[in-house]
Amino acid sequence: MILALVVCAAFAVTNTTMPSYYAVGKTARELGVSIGMQQKDAFQELLKADDSLITVLRPWKEANPKDFDAFYTTNKKAYPSIFEEIIGIAEGAELDDVNDTILLMLRPEIESIVANRTGRQFANDNCFDIINNAKGENAFVAHNEDWTPAYKPFGFVLHEDMAFASKDDATHITAFTYPASPVGFTFGYNSEGLVTSCNGLNPSPCKIGKLGRYFINRDVLAAKSIDDAIDRLKKAAPNSALGFGMSIGAVGSHRLYHAEMAPYDPHDSKGVDSDGHVDIIKIARGDTYLHSNSYTHEYFKDIQQYTSKSTQHRLARAAKMLAPTTSKLALEILGDTNDTEYPIYRHGDPNDPEELATISTALMDLDDALVYIYGGNPKDFSPVVVMPLFGYEKETKELGWAFIVAASAAGVLLLVVLVLSFILICICCCTCCHRTHRGSVNSAYRHLA
């Protein structure tokens, strides 16, 4: 499987619209250094092109050192390996200030804080998800990866081989990402067959010094199973700083879920001062689910949030189209430009402060175990990368103890039948042999043999 991934990665590198890199490390720091070294030139260019880093993130850090330190300490303690990887990336890229990588990891939280204080809105209404669990069709998760136009030339597929991973984590992760960032907050999959994709949400207020969205996303993508992913979300939720939407599935399984996380529980009497909360819904067999950059779970209907016009338009347009029960129909939605002002597939109009660019589109087929990644509009272009997903527990395995007991009983019964058949054959052979050679001087020898 790893050999197949390397071959796919080598093929992807030849396509200028979707480069691919393979990073390894005996430690998390080494892994980060490997990523940073490969992305050094791109990272240096990106730092010059990222307006938010220059005009928002760095100035916020200088003006609010205690708040930055609070985020720094909390996330380092909660996710030490991820934090070491981030520092390693900065070292490998030879950055003048390693904290730039931490600032980029905390971008959603910092921009939310600045927005709440100044009223300025940022382009965090990024991405669009489709989950399909229709009967008679392949299950899949499809995703539009939207980001600021400046990032369009820098997106790539990253394969992380983590020799240092504990027994509780996946040892290999593949995902779409950007320089300076570990995998996890866009779309990706791991060596256990788990797949995830994420959408930005804009709840208010952001909790200073709590867990950053990108750190949580990366931790979930290392989960060993769907249940493990859900447990990690529940563990992180009370201490979450902001929020996000996440689609979760697995190869060979029609168990599909969508999670929405928020920095407070709208049903708690403490209101915005309550702990964070995650709501997880199951996408039943026969259903499809669409999600963008607005809380849509019933549990969060009363949460305080900012929903952009782009999000409103994209969801409204998708609702008018045919239900995405096949991959073709899903790609029709993700590539739609019918709403010329706020299209689902976005071209990055610099005159519109809300408008972002669709950097890539992915369709992760959970039955065929393949991921298709598009560098252009999926309605008009073929995928630039096609890669195998890792295998996972099949649907029968997820039936639980009832299946295990039934399978064990069937195995024992088959063994008994085989043993009895063997004994019966031996008896027949011996009887025949005895009758045939009765009176022969060799009969006793033949019988003993």
Image (cartoon, rainbow, N blue to C red):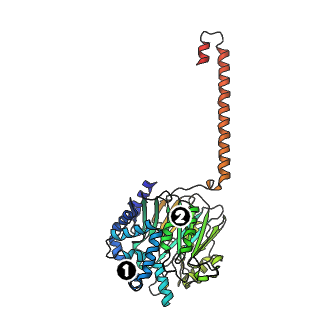
List x then y, in percent, for residue 237: 56, 72
Extreme residue in the bottom direction = 118
**Residue 400 on image: x %, y %:** 65, 54
Counting the numbered discs, the total is 2
Residue bearing the label numbered 1: 49
Please, what is the three-letter code of the amino acid marked with disc 2?
Answer: Val
Residue 388 vs residue 163, the one in the foreground: 163
Crowd band around label 1 with a 10 angstrom C-alpha radius: few (<14), some (14–19), many (20+): some
Gap between marks 1 and 2 measured at Cα: 31 Å
| Mark 2 residue element | strand
Q: Is residue 80 left or right of residue 429?
A: left
In this picture, is 234 found above or below 344?
A: above
* Residue 263, horizontal then vertical, whole percent: 56, 78
Residue type, label 1: Ala
Q: Which residue is drawn at 61% across and 13% down?
A: 444
In-image side of 207 versus 289 (left or right) = left
Query: Against 129, is 416 above or below?
Result: above
Sequence-first disc among 1 and 2: 1
Dot 2 crowding, Cα within 10 Å, few <14, some 14–19, many 20+: many
Which quadrant of the view contains residue 239?
bottom right
Judged from the image, the secondary structure of the residue bearing numbered disc 1 is helix
Q: Can you identify the residue that label 2 sits on?
A: 195
Q: In which quarter of the image is residue 34?
A: bottom left
- Using the rendered image of the protein, determine whether residue 329 is visible from the camera's viewpoint: no
Q: In this view, does 405 lie above or below 190?
A: above
Tell me if I can see residue 198 in this picture. yes
The mark found on residue 426 in the picture is: none
